[in-house]
Image (cartoon, grey):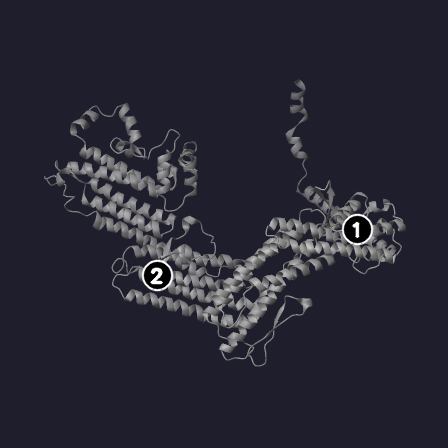
Amino acid sequence: MDWVDEYSHNSFDLRCLLDSFPGDLEFKQIFSDIDEQIGQNAASIENCIKEIQSKVNKHCPDVQLKTTTDCLEWLDDFDYDTAKTPSIPHGDLIKFLKKLQDLLTNEQNQEEMILDFLWDLSCQSNIFFPATLSGTSFHTLSRNSLHSIEDHSSIEVKSMWDDIRLHLRRFLVCRIERHNEINNPQQKILLKKQCIQKLLFLYPESEVIIKYQNIQNKQLAKFLQDDFPSYNRDSSLEILAHGYESAMLKLYSVIKEDFDTLCEILAPSSTVKFIKETYLDTITEEMAKLLQNFCERQFKDNAVPVAKTSKSSSKHRGTVHALVTPNVPEDGKDLFLSFEDLQFLSYLIKSMLKLENNAQELFQEIFSSLKVPRKYSGIFEKSNRKTMIEKPRAHAPMILSEQLLPGKETTLLDFAWRNAFKELSLPMACCITTTIENFSTRILQQEQRERSSVMSYAMDLVSAQDVWQDCHMFPDEEQPKKIAKFCSNIVEKLDTMLPLALACRDDSFQEIRANLVEACCKVATAVLARLQERSKEVPSKAPLRNLHILLSTAICVLQHFVQYDNFMKETTKKPMFLVPVQRYQEFINMLQFQVTNYCVRVCATSILQDAESHHWDDYKAFYEGERCSFSLQMWHYFYWALHHDLWTILPPKLAQEILTEVLEKSLGLLSSRYARAHPSYKRTPQIRLDITTIFTCMEDMLWPICSSVQELLNPHAHKNDKIFKIHSHCNNLLTTLVILASPLTELYKAFKHGMDESASGSLQTFLKPLHWLVCISSFYPSLLRSSSAGGLNVEGQLKLLLSQPGCNWNLLLGTLLCNDGLLPRILLRSSTI
């Protein structure tokens, strides 16, 4: 191994290696040279492409390459192996085509066999059949087809091949129409995809798309007639809105099916264009008709001549232009929209937004796939009639060119449904502020009348989950459970109006969004003032429970406005409700402090004040030593009543925080009071009974305020110091119990020789947070103890899980896995299945 030492010490000098690295200037020069070479290569490639383009345009009059994209597509489409394909004699070709004609004319159900035969012939023998536009002469075929079939401009050959293609096309079209009736989406997509691929073998992509579009237009017309609700003067706007919402969901499922059918066959731009022209533009026109009828009714109700809208020509289908008649004011201010009208329009916009977002997410899959090389679009080869292998087809637009060209922009979704609402944008902007202020004022006035009619006001509650119309961004532990009914009514109506602002993409909806934001800020201020007013009534005119309701209500309103900002940030780029959010956050912090402070003051000044129970120097035993103090009993009742209110009203996380703080501070009061007590001989048993009662209560109270096993068993290692303080107060009470209630003879025997090593070890154990639980285990067995594995046993895990204010998924998983899945095994054994 001498050579290794010689190499490591002599040949490999680390300092020399570091000195040999180039410096910053050298690196800059290297990168500059690389950039220069890349630029030269790009210029050389561009010149080569221009030369190829020039020579092809010169030698191939039927091919005209105008752009770099055309040149790349032509190169992708050119098959160099076709030059090796032997030409087919003209007479043999005639015989072959006549035989196919005879089979199709005289034999039944031979179409599938002929299609498979043509596929195999094209794939295995490298023969390409012409797929030109109908009526085009064979002279205009590309070089691929000219190399494959030796046609001499024979009108007979062209006529025979067109007849065969037409027969097969009818067969495939009938199949597609039958497949549309299949209820299984996956089976339908697969069968339709196979038929379209076979059509692309016979005809160019443009003709196939047009034919398939006609088929789907018939399906869409039937769908609009059956599922799209019709509008008339007596129609209920709410029923109509829900009908449109369900219809849009069904329409999206149809769009999704066609997307899955075409996305792997056509180029992305062709797929997007097909979906847009077939479905999105048609829905835009239907929406324009609906809004035209809606405007007519509104103008009649307001005694104003109707403003009509005209649809664009079929060439620009999907674009709606508003035309105002001379009798209608151009500003649209004479058109009054009630809350029901705005709600109806908002439901329509919400449905269109959902359809637009779903379609955009669908197409985003295609646009993201452009960065990854894909297979060509084409037909499939059959191998042993089972395996489908993709084969490029002639005259197909190559997807590869769209993937490789960095300067080519992907086709964006152009869903022009907002143009249908332009006629109503100004009336909506004018009416939305007044409408929101009116319904919020009416709801607040109704709440004030209810408050004035009673002496002690208990607020009506509703479930906060019913307020959220859509999923929200906050975790379950931060969501309120119950809120005030008057506030939920206001928030629900604001949620209803929100889509009017979310539709803002251009100038037509800018004013609507601005007015909506302004009105929402005014409503938020009015609701906050009402909540502040109600908070001042506790406890003189209202119960403590109202504070919990007000706190939960304020949190719900705050979360709604935070979510409004989150919805609008894509277009506004800045928070629109910054001031209301800050004010509500300050109010929530103040209310939380008010709840905690009030509960602690009630404990200190009322519940824990009992002259009879705390008469420690009395020489008469308290109820002959058979019961604890009344104040401890009331404290226990108060804690569990507070626990019930917090658990049923407030968000789980906040409920635990408040309950923990109240328990810690009230226990601190008890600890200090009993430490200052000097009981008589007759009252010493009361001290002993009171403190042991506190310990048994605390063992039961600890479970709800701990959200994890670590927080329960290792409070000193957890970030929540309040749990650790609770254990410290209990240990202090244990010290008081030992000093005041232990027999003097036992104390003298324990400490007459001072503290030996065993006593020092006992002291270290005493200083542990859970030491007081160990001391009471002899007369009060507790589940709050560690198992041999360092955690809780199954019973303790289950009790901790059931004590939580909400579903704690981490605890649920830990409980199911505890003791090697003991609980699931017990449930399975007990099952009757």
Which mark lies nearer to you, 1 or 2? 1
For label 2, the residue is 531
Residue 103: mark in rendering: 1
List x then y, in percent, for residue 212: 69, 58
Q: Which quadrant, please, contains the C terminus?
A: top left
Give the distance between the C-alpha atoms of the residues marked 1 and 2, in whole angstroms.
Answer: 85 Å
633 to the left or right of 652? left
**Quarter placement of the N terminus:** top right
Q: Crowding at label 2, few (<14), some or many (≥20) Cα neighbours within 10 Å?
A: many
Residue 799 at x, y percent in the picture: 35, 39
Most distant residue in the top direction = 1
Labels 1 and 2: the sequence-earlier one: 1
Q: Which of 827 and 267 is in front in this view?
A: 827
- Element carrying mark 2: helix
Residue 297: x percent and y percent?
52, 74
Evaluate whether residue 713 shows in this view. Answer: no
On the rendered structure, is 675 left or right of 369?
left
The residue at the point 39 percent across, 64 percent down is 525
When asked about the image quadrant of residue 205, the answer is bottom right
Residue 423 location in percent, x, y?
56, 72
Q: Which of 597 and 757 is in front in this view?
A: 597
